[in-house]
Image (spheres, rainbow, N blue to C red):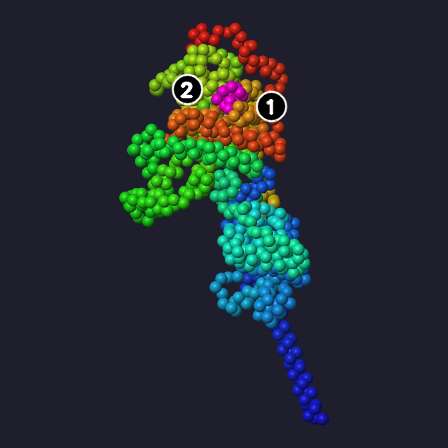
Amino acid sequence: MKQTSKKNKNKSLTIKRLWITFGCFWGFVFLFFALISLGWLGFMPSFEELENPKTNLATEIISEDGYVLGKFYQENRSNVPYEQLSPNLVHALIATEDARYYEHSGIDLKALFRVLIMRGSRGGGSTITQQLAKNLFPREKDRNIFEISFAKFKEWVVAVKLEKSYSKDEILAMYLNTVDFGNMSSGIKSAAKTYYDKKPQDLTIDESAMLIGMLKAPTKYNPRRNPENALNRRNTVLTQMNKYGYLTDEQLDSIKQIPINMDHFQLQDHRAGSATYFREYIRQVLTKWANENPKNKNEKWDIYKDGLKIYTTINYKMQKYAEEAVNEWVCKELQPKFFQQCKNNKNAPFVNIDATRTENLLNRAMKNTDRYKKMKKDGYSEKEIRKNFETPIQMWVHGINGEIDTIMSPLDSIRYMKSFLNCGFMVMSPNNGHVVAYVGGINYQYFQYDHVTQAQRQVGSTFKPFVYTIAMQEGEYYPCSLVPNLPVTIETPGSAPWTPKNSSKYKVGQMITLSEALAQSLNNISAYLMKRYGPSAVIHMVRKMGMTSDIPNVPSICLGACELTLYEMVGAINTFNNKGVYTQPIFITKICNNKGNVLATFSSTQEEVMDELSAYKTVRLMQGVVNAGTAVRLNYRYQLNMPMAGKTGTTDDNSDGWFMGYTPLLTAGVWVGCEDRDAHFRSTAEGQGANSALPVWALFMKKCYEDKELNLQKIDFSKPENINYVDDLFNCKEINAGVNTNSQQYNFE
């Protein structure tokens, strides 16, 4: 009995010790996780940090019709809510990563035990919530096994806290917003855009499965680099979806046969995509805004991390049509003709300049290259650098139909790149000043100089309407007023007498109407008006029309002997289209933070420059250019049948081709030319603005007006109100009936 009692006592003591050990173990576990949760054993995110997890978000540039034109980022990441995720994405993710996602509270104990027993042979034990915790609060690199294990415990705590702070749907969205898909795509929104040019809600089953499959190893399963691996991994995801009831057997068999299609793949790089020149201009504007409008006393807005939403005036479809028009005409039509001219020119692309000037041009361009600057910084002599530039190497260069792999010296590549015609094209809405399309050049990757807001070029005859407007505004002249078509000499103190010549012999020695003179772009008449009113009056007026560049106070500005930006010209010309009111062209309507709160709004400034009748007179003058003048090909070649007005312009030696034109709904300007004025077409037939620039305008307008979704009505220019006789001002045949048009009958001095 005593022995039995002793055995029972020992047994009870053993059980008691086991319970104490068990209790101590779980007490230690509880205390361990409590200390982790309190942050006593290292960093633990606060409640506020869990509610507002910090991730680097890309700033989005958004068109007025809601299309993301591009981003500024350190990580190409933009968040989307659960409602904007395709169900296919959710099903693929859960089936592949966490089949019991809706059954646990952050930690899947069943999966953990499976990992311990099977040693991971049947998959990992991390839940989607744990993986989110790891993404939001990454582990430090180069840690040992004990530190990694401790980090894992911390992730468990964070996962449980996340489950308490967010709904299951919110956690799914947060996870897909934080994961990396390779190719500079962080988050599902960027990935959908990069790989399929889609929004996340529009992804199909096979597309969703491919993207979710990449999460295991973005490089190994990259469809561009490793298409076979990507296909196999996608099919594995599809099989998992079938296993857990998200796909039928028939769907599985059918979808597995679909090849991976990367036709719409496009890296979201600042040099690629739509509106590249516009986005770079906006980046500069935003940088200035961020410096002048800090987030708080101690912090400035970071356009690469803070996920700002920049709502712009650009219309995505119009931007697309503008880029297509430039490519179709300048790149596909004009450029081959220019190359053909270069074949017969030993000094191509330069025309009529000597070897010394050519050498100066090339040497200056060489010194502007990164290669030269780096070699100079590294201590190379001018002789060594020159030898390097004259040594042929393998390189990729720009070509009409894409990049060309070739061998040439860096110096020859400079000469070659100078043989490309470039283009600037800007379109704005007349009344509110919104710039709806902006093309700064032919290819941002190779030609980063912006020909809309940056480049200043001589404007040629496109400046003449401003000179004519002075005459209209003074009330002395009307479109049907007769003026002598004879050479005019203007004498300026301190300068030699100046006598411009017409480019044609059109009705020389006769009296002609102002309407006819502008239509034929006659220099005699522009000089006649300039002599009468002087350059100061013209400069004073165009300053009120937004021109801020230097304009010399000389008579020759009547022929466009001044250098202006396309941005200035479009804004100024639009004054006529907007009833005499200058409306500043603008690019941004509002800036919001990543939560949608408005930080700033923008609207155009306006100034009345002239009365409505004077503006309408100039509109009618410029309609004459289209109906019977230098821009008449808009009608017979391009079959445009909406009301329109415009003016062509060509500078000396055909170095610059211009066309400024407008319809009642759109005002647009085009410039075409080479980087250097010494590179140009020999033939005026090819190089004049009517041939080089006007077709871009025509192709764009044709595309826009034929697009029913844009709904551009072919309305007429509005006439000044309460002026009944306005139409009589343009009935020149009746007004001038019986008038002797021999200019010698008139004393015009």
Q: Earlier in the sequence, mark 2 or mark 1?
A: 2
Given the image, on which type of amino acid does mark 1 rest?
Asp
Mark 2, other Cα within 10 Å: few <14 / some 14–19 / many ≥20: few
Given the image, on which type of amino acid does mark 2 rest?
Ser
**Foreground: 514 or 151?**
514
Image quadrant of residue 362? Answer: top left
Q: Mark 1 = which residue?
A: 716
Residue depicted at x 62% and y 75%: 24
Q: Mark 2 = which residue?
A: 503
Instruction: In the rendered view, tell whether residue 674 sits above or below residue 264.
Output: above
**Foreground: 522 or 428?**
522
Give the left or right position of residue 337, taking residue 643 as reference: left
Q: Residue furthest right?
A: 1
Residue depicted at x 51% and y 47%: 267
Q: Which residues are magenta?
A: 621-634
Element marked by disc 1: loop
Instruction: In the rendered view, tell whether residue 356 sits above or below residue 267.
Output: above
Mark 1, other Cα within 10 Å: few <14 / some 14–19 / many ≥20: few
